[in-house]
Image (cartoon, helix red, strand yellow):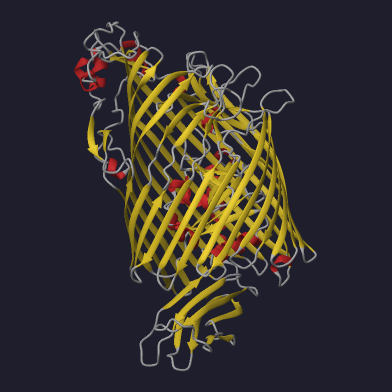
Amino acid sequence: MNTHQLFRSLLIVLVSIASFGHAMGQVGKVKGTISDPVTKEPVIGATIRLEGLTIGASTGIEGTFELASVPAGIYKLVVSSVGYQSQQIPNVRVESGKETIVTVSLQEDNKTLANVVVKAQKITTSEVAVLTETRQLQQIAVGISGQQIQKTQDRDASAVVRRIPGVSIFDERFVVVRGLNERYNTVLVNDIITPSTEVDSKAFSFDLIPSSIIDRMLIFKSASSDLPGDLGGGAIKIYTKTVPDGNTFSASFSTSYRSGTTAQKAMSYVGGKTDWLGFDDGGRQLPSGFPSRNSIATAGNTEAVISHFRNLPAFYHVEDKNVLPDFRGNLNFAHRWFMGDKELTNFSYVNYSNTNQAFQMQQRRFTFLGDTEKYYQDQSLSQNVRIGIMSNWALILNPNNKLEFRNLFNQIGIKETVFRNGYNENVDLNNASFRYEQRSIYSGQFSGTHELSAVSKLKWVTGLGYTFRTEPDYRRYTRSRERNSTGVFTFDLQQSDSPTLQQSARSFSHVEEFIYTTRVDFDHILKENEDEKLRTTFRAGIYTEYKERAFSNRWYGITNPNRLSSDNSLLKQDPANFFNPTNLGGNSIYYGVGTNFEDKYTAQNTFGAAYVQMYLPIGTKLNATIGLRGEYNNQELQSKERGSGAAIKVTNPVLSPLPSLNLAYNFTTKNLLRFAYSSTVNRPEFRELAPFTYYDFVYDVTRTGFIPRADKPKLLNATINNFDLRYELYPSKSELISLAVFYKKFLNPIESKVFYNGSTVAFTVDNATEATSTGVELEIRKQIAPNWVALFNAALISSNVRAGQSDNMLNRNLQGQSPYLINAGIFYENADKGWQANVLYNVIGKRIFVIGDSQLSADIYEMPRNVVDINITKALTKRIDFKLAIQDLLNQKFSLVQDTNRDGEISDKDGVYQEYHRGSYFTMGITMKF
């Protein structure tokens, strides 16, 4: 039976489970608030009962009530009070182990029926709910609620995650936990591992998930057997909304101004007619019937081949444009349908954004002695379009069985125009790059939750992930002239029919990846107790994943095999005239093929995991969670060697036993101490195993996979031993003070580094021998006054790396790790007056961007940036909110600095590798609720 058939058969078996699961003493709760619609005051002494049961309650001085031990089912709730109309609320669903929240505004006897809000599910979006959830978790974890996300007004998950202790963001998209490189973190959306959104590395782009669809986000800093084993920093779980509060529809629109970009003039190359939708219109694609590599290599100077290149879109077609303000809009829809004793719910979302960013970038490259060898001044404009669609469905068959179908799709289009001036050794430079990137990312999950009995629960998920990324017709050229002269620039071309990636080249690449996933988890209470913390529980599960990828790249460049002299007028034309198709000819300049054997690869990854876990209360204060996870992973890759075309076949099967232990000692109900140990791994990505070479114009480097050598023929898996200790104090349900220390021991950590082969510089990956990482974290969440809450979290981290066989440790951190992280915020909320406001602060310490080599390049560091954000929201009416946000108020420069004097420190004596200002960002928006 092949993998596809196995998934299909398993799905059929699991779905059939939905036919049973009768209630066996399963109970839930009904809680709520009764208020007066005019005065908004609580109604005291109101009577609440469930029709058909003898269970009832009355409201207290705050208008609240609770019905405990309610058998799972669907009921009619009856509310009555002297001086008010009695109300009957149908279809109140009670689920086992969950709380159904009912909010009622009673009307006086002479008035009509009032507003009723029913939320028949466990509340997970509030700050208290998330704080309670993380406290009850067996692992060391932190989180952020949907309620807190609304207060920050963050646009997407990349901004949201910065508010979480010990977490930072790299390149405004990728998460770094405890200062560790993004490759050491695993991201799960609704409990399914997400695919990497980047071709070159293991990284998930958090800016793909809008904040408005996030129910909550949890970050696990200690591992357990039910979490993926491929993590070193943390496992980030994002849960999207599925079951709505009620029937709603809302629309939001905003416009933004970025300093240095909006209303400025900028050069942009002309793209396709559908760029505004995030799709290429096909004009950039190679047409069908385009000559093969061999045809161009053997007959590139013939009219039959040259005519195909003349028919390609214009190489140089630019316009001077005024940059418009950014625009964002989204629609949210939620609905609940009752079908007898069943309920169907939907939560859907459509988002569109069209944004721009322009900046001037300064770049320098240095000799071994630290002298400036190259200087670039780039004028860059990036135009970004994104369409996001989410549609989540839930079918509640009965109180014990629920099916869910979740869908998330993102379409992204990025058009990037870069003009570069500068110098290189003895010549002045005038270069340019025109790039378009299109990405389509889909994640679909079909899952079921089944309460098999009062003590047993089964949950299963099957998923499909799809990623398509293409860079059609990526163009770049270089021109030069004598240094410090006023002469005309001359196009740089190879005087043979073999082009280079930099000189008048155009490339066409695409990658397509499918991921098929199945997960099953079974929970069973071995020893029942009224106190949930004293129940002995058993958990077991499996996780399977099959991933397949196909990548190809074709590239060509204009060459000068007829050896036209540098004084030839053709080579001295301006770009608009030089790239005129009529200049191509067999006796003049023409395109050569650069595509080589290594520019194509296919890859497969087969992954299977199983785990068992026991939760054991030891007395009333101490509990232990003991687990063992086994993971089998087999990476396979097929490509060819450059030049010879000899076959490359990678097969890397590894079986990893991963034990874990989590202990918690509860001193009182308000403070506890946690200890955790786990063994985890970190595996290479497909791109890191592939020999494919890619030219990155922005950094002026090539990027390539692992380069085998005699002492290290292949890239190894990294293994990590993790130790954590954390003290937690909960002064109240919404407050937290915690202090944690951690220690990690790495064997064969994978790092990004510079490789210099004597003529070109490349960014690649390699294993260090071993490393250690030690840190301390502090988190404080405190209500400092009525309506005011303060948040503060910080981490201090130290690491040492051994890269050779010597016993001496190098005096540097792991690549990508920050020595400190600080997040702080003050939140104000006045619900009666409709005001919300907050001020947020974030900074990360300098971290190694890429490791240098011993021949040319020293280590390159990303320097700290102090970031301050301000958000204000005012409810104009019950249905209209106005929002104002200022992001990156200080607009400090983004800076990469190279340790050119190689003393291990960064000072004014070191050279600036790259620097620019992104610009402060001002947003005004309105949200309308219907």
Depth check: 584 or 22 in front? 584
Depth check: 690 or 899 in front? 899
Residue at 40 percent across and 90 percent down: it is 108
Location of the N terminus by quadrant is: top right
Depth check: 619 or 9 in front? 619
| Position of residue 463 measured from the top left corner of the image (x, y, whole percent) | 51, 49
Does residue 397 appear left or right of residue 485 in this picture? Answer: right
Compared with 5, 589 (above or below) is above
- Asked whether residue 365 appears in the rendered view, the answer is yes
Q: How many labels does the image show?
A: 0
| Position of residue 540 measured from the top left corner of the image (x, y, whole percent) | 68, 54
| Position of residue 395 measured from the top left corner of the image (x, y, whole percent) | 47, 65
Quadrant housing residue 872: bottom left
Depth check: 848 or 404 in front? 848
**Residue extending furthest toward the right:** 619
| Position of residue 773 measured from the top left corner of the image (x, y, whole percent) | 67, 39
Does residue 555 appear left or right of residue 16 in this picture? Answer: left
Does residue 249 appear left or right of residue 311 in this picture? Answer: right
- Asked whether residue 518 appears in the rendered view, the answer is no
Location of the C terminus by quadrant is: bottom left
